[in-house]
Image: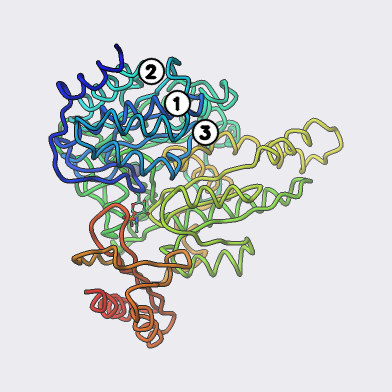
Amino acid sequence: LRYRTVYAFAREMYPKTVKSDISYGTAGFRTRATDLSYVMYRMGLLAVLRARYKNAAIGVMITASHNPEPDNGVKLVDPMGEMLEQSWEKWATKLANVTDDKLENVMNDIINEYKIENMNDRPEVLIGKDTRPSSPSLAKAVVDGVLALGGKPIDYGIVTTPQLHYFVVCKNTHRAYGQPTEEGYYKKLTGAFKKVRGQNFNNGNYTNRVLYDGANGVGAKKVKYLREGLEGSLLVDMYNDEIIGSGKLNYLCGADFVKSQQKFPTGLPQDPNLRCCSVDGDADRIVYYYLDEDKKFHLLDGDRIATLIAGYLKEVLEKTSIDLNLGLVQTAYANGASTDYITNELKVPVACVSTGVKHLHHKALEYDIGVYFEANGHGTVVFKDSAKKRLKDALQTNNLSDEQKEATDKLLNIIDIINEAVGDAISDMLLVETILHSRGWSIKEWESAYADLPNKLLKVTVENRAVITTTDAERKCLTPDGLQREIDSIVSKYPKGRSFVRPSGTEDVVRVYAEASTKQDCDRLAAEVARKVF
Ligand code: NG1
Ligand code: ZN
């Protein structure tokens, strides 16, 4: 009987109103909020199937991240906090696009394909949403889908994407990772942060005040709670914290605006040399920046954060007695200067993978300690369980020198500052602040490690972006025939030139990236390559 209700309910309450297809991409489904009710209900159904198949709790996050306020979206979170496994993405797409009368067939196809027999189990589905005005009704659609199929929805209300990932991991590790509550999340992060910082809140050229752009979204709402737990160890000055219904979400502010426009956001005081950071609309990305005495804008993006973290972890690691391998993972969008610096100065192995967090995360897991960041500020650090165990075991033995003991203890605390499940703006901010504090660095000193090559990212609209296929972590085109040869010949004219093109996974555009030794060359290179794509 319940089964009939599932589909009758779908037809009545959440009919498929949109004819055109959508597809589950690198960031799940994302489109205008008004077109998403039926998709949400269906993702509620899919989450229950996935949870039954994995015998674990699954997450559903409702957000469109850095997109404008009228958009929304949904992504599923797998048991260990990863993005939904790739082989299920095509089922998500099928389920979203099938007509109401065929919904039951696709559901049965999934049940048969994965031989899901425990259809009476009542697994937990953890649901989170961002601050968009459309989010509550879309969350209700997910809840209805979960209930209709007999799952147990747990509504976390408004949370950041990384918080939801954290809750899912806590649930599925029986709290070994932490308490699956917001309070548990803040306590874990701030507790570890305060331990590492100690009693001296300032150090050398580091001052414990950061200007924080909340993008008028969930990242603003949540930092208010975090601040209390920090107890003055870090002063977070909040800007752009108009939240629900202001229409200002991500507007002229936030990490995506700052990174893609390479501009100072609205709403923050423009005093020179102040350390500022911006998060995006679901607080899974962060970038730092400042204005100098001449009001020139300086951006410290994901590449900078990654190099700061990798350099520091390498140093702390060397002071312990334990031999763990450390690696850094980037995408082709990482600035060439950062890659050179990591390889030649830090001497940390660096890998390049395709765009999309799941690729970075997956590759990072190959190292004992894997640091990964996209240039846009999404990233984190992952530690192998065996690496953590070795650190903990070493601390138990009594044969460490004081220096080794201190370094091991510090590293273990640093692990607790980090949200290993997924890139997390709030946790990444605490980690950056910890490192700058420990080094006694101002933001300028951090920046002085290397000089970014001028770079440019263009969007080109073409009839069918799928005609472009790539290889070598998206750095080379396979098709259309001859395009790569043309790009190579253009690039060869520019000193330190590098350029590649690839179809976006989230927008109907082809992205053109270029970098070169001067801004003028970089602009020319980007324009020349873009012309070949038309
Ligand atoms: P696409 O649209 O595939 O380039 C963008 C970002 C990714 C990633 C995803 C998911 C760039 C160049 N691309 O992907 O880094 O964050 O969105 O949000 O920034
Ligand atoms: Zn985001």
Residue at label 2?
Answer: 151
Image x and y of residue 384, in percent: 64, 41
Which of pointers 1 and 3 indicates the residue nearer the eye?
A: 1
The residue tagged with tag 1: helix, strand or loop?
helix
- CA–CA distance in space, label 2 to label 1: 9 Å
Reading the image, the residue beneath label 3 is: 80
Q: What element does badge 3 sit on?
A: loop
Disc 2 and disc 3: Cα gap in Å?
A: 19 Å
Amino acid under disc 1: Ala
Q: Which residue is mark 1?
A: 51
x, y percentage for residue 374? 43, 54
* Tag nearer the camera, 2 or 3: 2
Question: The N terminus is located in which quarter?
Answer: top left
Dot 1 or dot 3: first in sequence order is: 1
Please provide percent x and percent y for residue 184.
Answer: 49, 22
From what the image shows, is residue 107 above or below residue 434?
above
